[in-house]
Image (cartoon, rainbow, N blue to C red):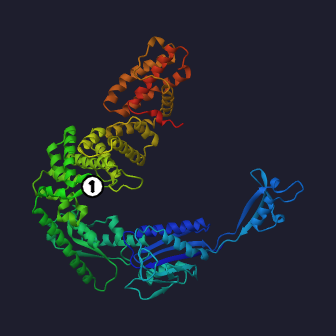
Amino acid sequence: MSTRDLLIEIGTEELPPKSLAGLSAAFEDSVCQQLKAKSLQFDACQRFATPRRLALLLTRLQESQADQENTRFGPAVKAAFDDNGNPKPAAEGFARSCGVSVENLQRTEKDGVEKLSYTILEKGVATKELVPDIVMQALGQLPIPKRMRWGSSRTEFVRPVHWCVLLFGEELIEGTILDVESSNTTFGHRFHSEGALTLTKAQDYETLLETQGKVIPRFEKRKELIREQVLAEAERANANAVIEDALLNEVTALVELPVAMTGDFDVDYLQVPQEALVLAMKSHQKCFNLVDDNQRLLPKFITISNLESKDPAQVIEGNERVIRPRLADARFFFETDKQSPLASRYEQLGNLVFQDKLGTVKDKCERVSKLASALASQTNGNQNYCERAARLSKCDLLTNMVGEFADLQGLMGYYYALNDGEPKEVAQAINEQYQPRFAGDAVPDSLTGALLAISDKLDSIVGLFGIGQPPTGSKDPFALRRAAIGVLRIMIEKELTLDLASCIEIALENFSGKDFEADTAAKVFEFMLDRFRAWYLDEGISAEEFQSVFELRPTSPLDFHQRIQAVHHFNSLPEAAALAAANKRVSNILSKEEVGGDTAIDETLLTDMAESDLFKLLGAVEKEVGPLFSAGKYTEGLQALSVMKDPVDRFFDQVLVMADEETVRRNRLALLGKLQALFLHTADISQLHKS
């Protein structure tokens, strides 16, 4: 089969930088999937993305679909002809549907039955005839939240389209894409390239743009070039560059020909918290900041220009001139905010609505204050610190700095609290209340911060569940799933022996007077435990291991975690599979009988050596593991129970549990109940058995 390279390029006005990488990947996925669905094979696909273009280069793409034989099956031969061999209406109807006479039909065996059939040879369609529709469908499927129109056209796309290239090897594929006629001409850099660039073959695309168009079309190549340039500039400045991937991606999507330059700003601005200065440089000017070896901000920044200037000094000066007012604003906000204590803003929180049915932000702070204080009394925390931190926790929302830079909420509260002379742990807790902010983020370091974060998140979860607004499907506008994982992580990583069910009840009491759903506490508890499932599956815990603990519904997240770790270790032991199977068998037997683990066992009825041995071992093991389980040492306890394997196996091999004599049968069932109860101190390990 003959092949050629296919180039697809859509030239536009500047595409949204934060969406560029996603649009490029989605474009590639759609085109490739459509080609495969049409049985068109190719060797590889290279995608290109710049502010002004989305492009794909598919190498060694088939020139056309392969011819295919499609066989249609009709009625069974026995039903198609009468006793004299004459065709019945069923045969004639099938022949008409195939466009032939009955004599032209074949007979083919299918599923053991001889049937009438007809084979049609379908010629494969030329690739160039399919490409325009494939491109249009791919563009229509792009994840564009809001499309725009331009001119008098009704065509919609993320940005106006100015040119389109559809080049198959050296042949132009004629077509209209988003009201633009395809051609073999592309365009280079806005300032370094003049006029159209003619492509003679698809494979020349990247080379032509780089050499004549002064454009680096490959996103990843451009990204790594920017990284190298920034590091080189930092080295020349005897500093360390802070390169965050999100900013690097955004800058890569803003330029076609990156050139890094270093600028300076007044050292006096360093009196402002460096996080505010960094955010001002990043969000407004897309600059990379520089720090010294102690991670202190330096009065320098690196900007990425989209052209090679003949006078770089003027470009640097222009960037310095633009960034100066941004930093001045940050300094003004900081100095102005400090003139009023955080506490003076508390009453004004009553004017901020948290949620229509749940009251204001002030109401929330009061609830969180009560909950944090209650949790502090259970964990040897400082109740006064917790109450104070909760009352001040949202006050920075009313500051000028957070009004301009919302990402600084909590952090600015920390700086302003320190300025007001608040205890350091109170200030620290204000900053830590939002932790962990994302997967992998650290939990609060201080105990006050941990209790405040738990209280804040739990208040939101309980309140929103109470008014019937839990997460649904993929929708979670209040990020309650993330909040739930945060609560669980804090309790576990800070080793807080808090009872989750009790915490939920306390949080619920703080909403007194609200018309909440009756089963709110139960729903929240199940929701929280279910978040454990997703978390542990990501951590490599099997579904069976999780379910074995979930069956017991431990109410302490720390205790739940310790049990999970114990079961995970136990499941790696060679005895685990046999003991899990035995427990499954025990569970099945006992589920049909009314026998508990505390039922008395009559030793005189243990006439079989296997059941007598099991009874004695149970007594000895119970004395050993009882203190371990009481101390929460579940791993050691389950490890000790692994010695039960052989005695349990012998019991089931040699003893008839359901004996005819009722007293013997009940005694043996009680023995199994005692065995099951030992394991249930940690988990229902029968769940580990994969039937």
Q: Residue at x 39, y 39 (%)?
A: 564
Residue closest to the eye, 539 or 108: 108
Residue on which disc 1 sits = 355
Q: Quadrant of the N terminus?
A: bottom right
Residue 588 image point, x, y percent: 51, 29
Relative to 193, 582 lies left or right: right
Relative to 205, 273 lies left or right: left
Q: Residues within 10 Å of mark 1 (few under 14, many from 20)?
A: few
The vertical placement of 13 against 122, above or below, is below
Asked which quadrant contains residue 317, the reply is bottom left
The vertical placement of 384 against 635, above or below, is below
Can residue 239 be seen?
no
Residue 193 image point, x, y percent: 41, 86
Can residue 480 be seen?
yes
Residue closest to the eye, 122 or 204: 122
- Amino acid type, label 1: Gln
Q: Residue at x 23, y 43 (%)?
A: 512
